[in-house]
Amino acid sequence: MNTTPLPPTTVIDCRPSLTGRVALVTGGMGGIGWATVQALAVHGVHVAFTYARGHESPEAAAAAAATLPVEASTHALDLAHIESIRACVAEVFARWGHVDILVNNAAVGTATVAAFATDPALQDSAMFAINADGTLKMCQTFLAHGAGAPAKIVNISSVGGGVQVFPGFRMSDGMSKAAVAHLTRQLAAELVDSPIDVFALCPGATDTPMFRSSTLDPLGSDERDAFVAALPKGRLIDPAEIAQLIVFLASQYSAPLHGAVVDASLGLGVRPGRITG
């Protein structure tokens, strides 16, 4: 990964610093994860992406990988279990020899956590185990395998918890995403003199199956229309918009942002009352 400062006349083209690199993207089968896999691939990055063990099929993951313009690999992952995390990261390093980019995207939300437990209290515990502790363990395991080699770590948090508080939204969801933002800042502080850059990206209302199931699907048609109309710009964020930001953070141009927790919410982070007022 090139860490040489760039002259101010440099044309921003992410491909030279990305082509031939290897990225590990967790939760790569849908929403922001799949958009990220595709965006990195078209920039020449070899992508190892994960599917949720027990919830997504290896056949579907392999079929998705076959559509990419670069060689890719797929790996099972259960973020709630350290053995699965260790096995996944070891498998990726064994397959590719090195990993230059880690995108911690896999997570559960208010609705999707129901697939892991029926008791609301246990769901809250699963939220922390997967979103917060799982991301922590992924970072720790990745860093141990990389042994200080140049790398980029992009943690996906959320505007809810990572940037703002939204009354009425599930507390464990926001708390787990706030933990990811804190993890990013602390890792960045500890790695400030290393060749490893760390960032957190905090999307707002993004048009993903997770957001639809947790927020939009429980609403009636008119309520959904009113909710979206009240959002900044009157629309949902497209997953591809978040993926392009991840591409930038994975490139050589992102170094000055080391440690940044980036509000990527179309302005919802500075005007939360648009949906809570």
Image: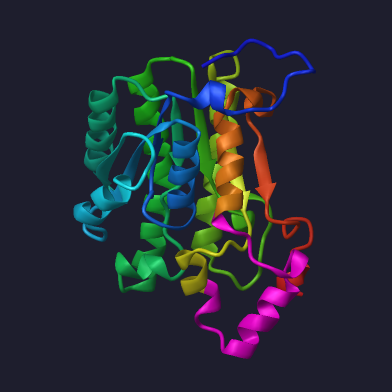
Q: Is residue 277 left or right of residue 101?
A: right
Q: Is residue 146 left or right of residue 173?
A: left
Residue occupying image coordinates x 30% and y 50%: 51
Residue 119 percent across, percent down from the top left: 33, 73
Residue 87 percent across, percent down from the top left: 22, 35
State the predominant SS element of the stretch in magenta: helix
Q: Is residue 199 visible?
A: no
| Residue 216 part of the magenta segment | yes
Residue occupying image coordinates x 44% and y 50%: 33
The segment highlighted magenta reads 215-239
Q: Is residue 272 left or right of residue 128?
A: right
Q: Is residue 151 left or right of residue 85?
A: right
| Residue 12 part of the magenta segment | no
Residue 23 percent across, percent down from the top left: 41, 32
Specify the quadrant that holds the C terminus: bottom right
Disc count in the image? Answer: 0
**Which of the 4 image quarters holds residue 120?**
bottom left
